[in-house]
Image (cartoon, rainbow, N blue to C red):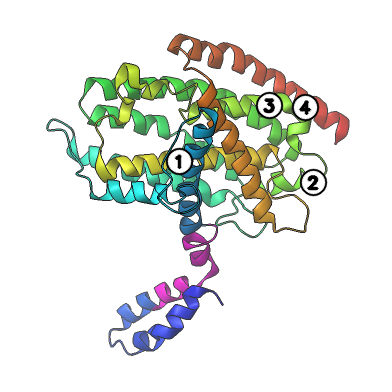
Amino acid sequence: MNIINIILDFLNLENFISNIPNADVQELLTIVFVFLRSDLFFKILFFPGIFTILIFVAELMWLELKFLAKVQLRVGPQYAGRIGGILQPIADFIKLLFKESIVPEKASKVLFLLIPIMLVTLAATTLTVIPLSETDVISNLDVGLLFTFAILAMFPVIALLAGWASNSKYPFIGGIRALFQQVSYEVPLWLSALGVVILAESLNFTSIIKAQSTFWFILLLPLGAFIFLVAIIAELERLPFDIPEAESEIVSGWMAEYSGLNFGLIMLSLYIKLYFGAALFTALFLGGWLGPSILPPAFWFLTKTVIVVSIIILLRGVLPRFRLADLLQIGWRRLLILSMVNIFLAITVKLVLF
């Protein structure tokens, strides 16, 4: 029995519903009550769902602050929580919650306000098919990998809409840059993941992870893993691929006009997307939850994900930003060719080892 069932039993809602005179309302509330008691609702709300992801993402923000401070020898806040400012992300959220959200006078107001909600919803949707273990997954889709790529392909369109809805020059330029960049790197991203599909013979994440019980795919397809990591960093718009948000050129890119809670929602969606990118790499190339049985499977999955996130954060601290022309050349001319080579390597490995 989980905590939700304990609360529902304490409130005695079942008895309350049975005393409702209207049969249609009673039937509707009964359906809702059954759903609230289900394991699916618990997974969506608690583990591995919304509550777990929010806590994990908040601490990823703290990890980035502390890690970059160590790399660049900077001093950060120490007082928001006793353990090295561990509560700083929560303090930042509270600050943004009470700051004024300014909407530009000539902006498309409805679309402008919907963009942050759309970004958070899309980012959260991608996590429904990523399994922390064989049982800890919200939706075990047979085409889970295809589903995540379909959702991922919508982010550049929303970034462009955010720039257009702001009715401002710099956000619109940032939106166009985001569209160019993410489209350029989505093709190598898909093709590098195709090598994993060839070896696992499945688009289901659980099947892909189980197929790595002998060898992690990063050992069999190191080139594919490299291409995928570079492409996912470009999709995340993080250094050295943060051209859509270059402060020195276009203020803050496509999100420049957002403030207050709207800005906080956008940042939340970006960090959820960071977790998603690292979790996707973990599932495809690092064996997902596979590890010594002395610790639970979810521990191994989250540990590997944190390691991948740390690598992505490290690049932000040590690399400069690419020029737009260099970025497009890397995506279309180099990674695209390498991803084709990776497919032939995957076919060779499949024929030889499997």
Quadrant where the C terminus is found in the figure: top right
Among the two numbered marks 1 and 2 on one chain, the one whose residue lies closer to the N terminus = 2
Q: Residue at x 30, y 19 (%)?
A: 250
* Label annotation for residue 213: 2
Farthest residue, direction right: 352
Q: Secondary structure at mark 3?
A: helix
Q: Residue at x 44, y 79 (%)?
A: 7
Q: Is residue 260 left or right of residue 290?
A: left
Q: Identify residue for label 4.
A: 347
> Which tag, 1 or 3, sits closer to the chain's start?
3
Tag 1: amino acid: Tyr
The range drawn in magenta is: 30-48
Packing grade of label 4 (10 A; few <14, some 14-19, many >=20) is few
Counting residues from the start of the chain, the first of labels 4 and 1 encountered is 1
Residue at image location 45% in from the left, 21% down from the top: 181
Q: Amino acid at mark 2?
A: Ser
Circle 4: residue type: Ile
Q: CA distance from mark 2 to mark 3?
A: 19 Å
Tell me which secondary structure the magenta stretch mostly adopts. Answer: helix
Q: Which residue is mark 1?
A: 271
Callout 3 environment at 10 Å: few (<14), some (14 to 19), or many (20+)?
many
Q: Which mark is residue 320?
A: none
Is 105 situated above or below 131? above
* Residue 212 percent location from the top left of the image: 76, 43
Q: Counting other residues with Cα less than 10 Å from the Cα at mark 2, is it few (<14), some (14-19), or many (20 or more)? A: few
Q: Secondary structure at mark 2?
A: loop
Question: Where residue 190 sits in the image (x, y, percent)?
Answer: 59, 29
Foreground label between 1 and 3? 1
Which numbered disc, 2 or 4, marks the residue closer to the eye? 2
The residue nearer to you, when weighing 80 against 211, is 80
